[in-house]
Image (cartoon, grey):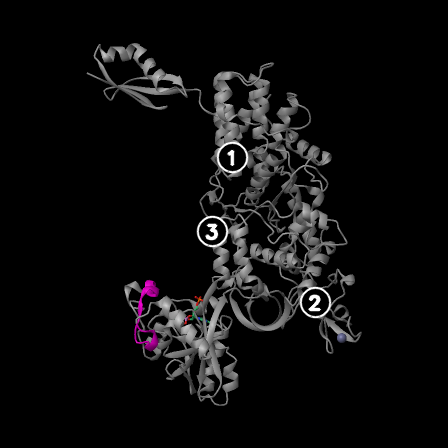
């Protein structure tokens, strides 16, 4: 019988679902295991061949865990709010909900055709009011704990999406989503105080098993630094405070720079003599992104404030104050002391604008080659600090500043609070009303979910307000506090809201009393193994850790960290090695592959394509190779004998393969696991036949990778009761993993004279006697006297003769 995947795959998919074999139980005596992949955004393009790489990998883990006797939760859902759907809706005049439904149906059908063992009974959808009710509920808790607040902020504004972006969504100065220019704009925004958790988000990385590169990226993004705040008096009487990581260089601070948005500029507007020039500069700076402003390479610009000077507290010298866009308002205090001898950007600025450059660390000058090593230098031109090392000087100056009330030690973080509002329709409404008398008032929890109203147009308004702002019926409401007239918040939550807690909902997806029951959370969390993209490291992964820590603090979840283990897959590229995209014409549609070769082949190929953690190009030849492997497996049925266990000649290859496949799966080495199965099948064909027991073990080992064909072979040949996916993962015997006989090289006076087959654990005496008894070796010795017998265990015997 020829292998034909058509029909076979759909048949098994139907049976699995009908029998609910992949449905996790919330009431089980088995140990639990929670595997998770990042749930997809159901875009209009359908599934990409990149999606199954992650899904298949964890499917293999999930299926293996079930075979090992675990109660496994491997859930799936839809992260369905977001801009692409909204933009499609605007363009085609259909409701985003309709678009979303259609896209989900397509994704679901595609995913099911791959035979991933998702628990479809727990499917969730972030745009479902019964889901976003709890997203809104978490927002209210954040608000009640002072972690959600509204603020006039200078934000990233995408000129094309007409929408605010978080810092994390701005990549190389452009919108992460659409690639358009991002400018700064002052807007009143809802913010979440992720900064309050900055230290814990760093510290608790010690509690989890994440790849080093993921931990490093999160730490860099949070950007903890230690230094000091220093207060500078000014000639206008006001104080200007700076943040510096190098307080030791205070004697070299020959000017100050404040950001163009610094509030002191308005206060001083009457006294600053060149205010026109200042205003022009402010306007130009507002049009630039933080990325452009802080680029080291860029030409420095700025304006000196005429009519005011600062006073360096360490030597009472008057120094000029500039505004320049390389100082950001959002970091530290928005003001710096500039030390041109030891900071590259200050040096470039001083070269152009003239303030003196005073060296204070010998061996740490910007122009010296050893500059990067400046922290190893010795202090000079620095009064009380002269002769000290940089580290000693930092301690001494910080003490001096503190004692003289001119400053204090300070820890700073690069991480900013999370801009949490979007001026869009297709997102969770923020459950807050504004009352003239009472201010921002939370909706009573009993009024959740606050559902999206039906609107006719989804376009953002001309002034950048959300389309909801035009829905006066919906907007005008009464204040839950005083009963007076009030207005609803018209901004909605960002794309990242629903995904910040979705893994909790899977544990108890239909609960309408709580986001999930205490019991379900106790049993299932934390997630045991979470695989996702590196691109989410400083977005979703960080956001969800923050929400989880907050939920832990208010005793909603039982653990401080959401995910015990995180892994990350590489991208699948086009055949030409470039990122797959329509414009490059190198997109592969998974539907075509499944149709032509079958899901089992597709899955095997996606796992065989290369190192799981690295990018790998698609290969049509690779697909055909995997298809041949499936056919070879199928054809084992032609050489199947009536009965028998694992034959002695195949015992070692079988035990070795069981061990290798099991270990490789745990270590993300799916490609070498498949290679081991390919090698075992060669050994089987070499032997000319296969016994039922051998076919049974091989089938179970292959099942997580190729679940359909293995079920078919299992049932056709009646290899056991129930389905393969309900069997037990085979055990191996360490002793039987060793090759039984090995080749030992025999030398006479260092010259190879023969190779002998011996037991793997042969001892010296036996090895030497066997060598001496061999005819060829005897001839080589030729009756001479043996002076020395050398044995290298498992490798060689050398006889020294004379
Ligand atoms: C004096 C100095 C001398 C500095 C020196 C550095 C080297 P990290 O490590 O990233 O935290 N800085 C402070 N606030 C800033 C802002 N709002 N915009 C731009 N730059 C700012 O960087 C801290 C250093 O970056 C601070 O230490 C300050 O320059 C600058 F040899 O102060 B330093
Ligand atoms: Zn009120």
Q: What's the CA distance linking mark 2 and mark 3?
A: 41 Å
Task: Please give the name of the residue rendered at 47% of the width and 45% of the height, measured from the top-left corner.
Answer: 615
Q: Determine whether the residue tagged by mark 3 lies in a helix, strand or loop.
A: helix
Q: In this figure, which residue is indicated by the disc labeled 2?
A: 468
Query: In the picture provided, is 79 more to the left or to the right than 378?
Result: right
Q: Quadrant of residue 717?
A: top right
| 258 inside magenta stretch | no
Neighbourhood count class around disc 3 (C-alpha, 10 Å): few under 14, some 14–19, many 20 upward: few
State the residue position of label 3.
Answer: 213
C-alpha separation, residue under disc 1 versus residue under disc 2: 54 Å
The kind of secondary structure element at disc 1 is helix
Is the CB of mark 1 within 8 Å of ligand 1? no
Q: Quadrant of the N terminus?
A: top right
Characterize the local packing of mark 2: few (<14), some (14-19) or many (20 or more) Cα atoms within 10 angstroms.
many
Q: Is residue 597 above or below residue 468?
A: above
Q: Which residues are magenta?
A: 372-386
- The residue at which mark 1 appears reads as 663
Q: Which numbered disc, 1 or 2, marks the residue that appears first in the sequence?
A: 2
Q: Nearer the viewer, residue 398 or 659?
A: 398
Secondary structure under the numbered disc 2 in the rendered image: helix
Whole-percent x, y for residue 159 in the image = 55, 67
Left or right of residue 560, residue 686 in this image:
left
Quarter residue 467 falls in: bottom right
Find the distance from the CA under tag 1 to the CA under tag 3: 23 Å
- 395 above or below 262? above
């Amino acid at each position: 019988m020829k292998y034909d995947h058509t029909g076979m795959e759909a048949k098994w998919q139907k049976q699995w679902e009908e029998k609910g074999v992949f449905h996790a139980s919330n009431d089980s005596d088995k140990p639990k295991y929670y595997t998770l992949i990042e749930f997809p955004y159901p875009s209009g393009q359908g599934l990409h061949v990149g999606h199954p790489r992650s899904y298949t990998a964890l499917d293999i883990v999930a299926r293996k865990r079930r075979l090992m006797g675990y109660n496994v939760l491997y859930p799936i859902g839809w992260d369905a709010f977001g801009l692409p759907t909204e933009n499609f809706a605007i363009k085609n005049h259909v409701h985003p909900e309709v678009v979303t439904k259609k896209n989900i149906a397509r994704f679901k059908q595609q995913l099911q055709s791959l035979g991933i063992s998702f628990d479809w009974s727990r499917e969730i959808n972030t745009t479902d009011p019964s889901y976003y009710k709890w997203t809104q509920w978490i927002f209210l808790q954040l608000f009640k704990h002072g972690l959600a607040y509204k603020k006039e902020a200078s934000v990233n504004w995408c000129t094309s999406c007409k929408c605010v972006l978080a810092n994390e969504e701005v990549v190389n100065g452009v919108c992460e989503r659409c690639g358009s220019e991002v400018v700064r704009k002052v807007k009143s925004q809802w913010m979440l105080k992720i900064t309050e958790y900055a230290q814990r988000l760093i510290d608790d990385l010690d509690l989890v098993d994440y790849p080093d590169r993921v931990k490093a990226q999160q730490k860099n993004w949070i950007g903890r630094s230690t230094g000091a705040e220093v207060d500078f008096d000014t000639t206008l009487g006001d104080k200007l405070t700076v943040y510096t990581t190098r307080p030791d260089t205070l004697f070299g601070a020959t000017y100050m720079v404040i950001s163009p948005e610094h509030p002191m500029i308005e206060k001083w507007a009457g006294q600053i003599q060149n205010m026109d020039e200042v205003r022009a500069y402010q306007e130009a700076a507002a049009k630039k992104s933080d990325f452009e402003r802080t680029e080291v390479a860029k030409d420095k610009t700025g304006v000196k404030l005429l009519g005011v000077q600062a006073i360096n507290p360490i030597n009472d010298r008057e120094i000029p104050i500039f505004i320049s866009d390389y100082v950001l308002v959002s970091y530290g205090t928005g003001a710096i002391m500039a030390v041109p001898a030891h900071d590259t950007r200050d040096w470039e600025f001083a070269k152009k604008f003239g303030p003196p450059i005073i060296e204070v660390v010998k061996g740490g000058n910007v122009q010296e080659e050893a500059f990067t090593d400046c922290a190893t230098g010795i202090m000079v031109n620095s009064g009380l600090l002269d002769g000290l090392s940089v580290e000693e000087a930092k301690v001494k100056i910080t003490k001096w500043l503190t004692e003289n009330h001119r400053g204090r030690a300070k820890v700073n973080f690069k991480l900013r609070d999370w801009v949490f509002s979007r001026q869009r329709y297709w997102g969770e409404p923020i459950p807050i009303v504004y009352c003239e008398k009472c201010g921002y008032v939370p909706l009573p929890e009993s009024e959740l979910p606050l559902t999206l109203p039906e609107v006719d147009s989804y376009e953002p308004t001309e002034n950048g307000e959300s389309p909801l702002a035009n829905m006066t019926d919906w907007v005008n409401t009464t204040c839950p506090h005083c009963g007076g007239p009030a207005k609803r918040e018209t901004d909605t939550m960002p794309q990242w809201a629903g995904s910040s807690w979705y893994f909790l909902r899977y544990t108890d997806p239909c609960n309408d009393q709580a986001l999930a029951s205490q019991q379900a959370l106790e049993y299932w969390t934390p997630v045991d193994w979470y695989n996702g993209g590196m691109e989410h490291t400083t977005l979703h992964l960080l956001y969800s850790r923050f929400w989880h820590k907050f939920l832990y603090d208010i005793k909603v979840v039982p653990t401080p960290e959401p995910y015990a283990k995180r892994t990350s897959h590489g991208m699948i590229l086009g055949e030409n090695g470039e990122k797959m995209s329509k414009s490059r014409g190198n997109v592969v549609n998974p539907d075509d592959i499944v149709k032509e070769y079958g899901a089992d082949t597709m899955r095997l190929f996606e796992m065989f394509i290369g190192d799981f953690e690295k990018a790998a190009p698609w290969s049509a030849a690779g697909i055909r190779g995997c298809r041949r492997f499936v056919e070879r497996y199928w054809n084992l049925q032609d050489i199947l004998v009536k009965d028998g266990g694992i034959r002695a000649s195949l015992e070692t290859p079988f035990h070795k393969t069981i061990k290798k496949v099991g270990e490789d799966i745990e270590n993300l080495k799916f490609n070498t696991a498949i290679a081991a199965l390919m090698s075992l099948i060669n050994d089987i064909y070499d032997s000319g036949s296969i016994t039922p027991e051998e076919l049974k073990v091989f089938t179970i080992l292959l099942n997580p990778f190729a679940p359909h064909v293995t079920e078919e072979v299992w049932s056709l040949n009646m290899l056991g009761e129930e389905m393969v996916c309900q069997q037990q993962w085979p055990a191996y015997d360490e002793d039987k993993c060793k090759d039984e006989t090995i080749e030992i090289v025999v030398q006479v006076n260092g010259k190879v004279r023969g190779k002998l087959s011996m037991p793997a654990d042969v001892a010296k005496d036996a090895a030497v006697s066997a060598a001496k008894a061999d005819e060829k070796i005897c001839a080589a010795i030729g009756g001479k006297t043996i002076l020395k017998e050398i044995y290298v265990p498992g490798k060689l015997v050398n006889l020294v003769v004379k």
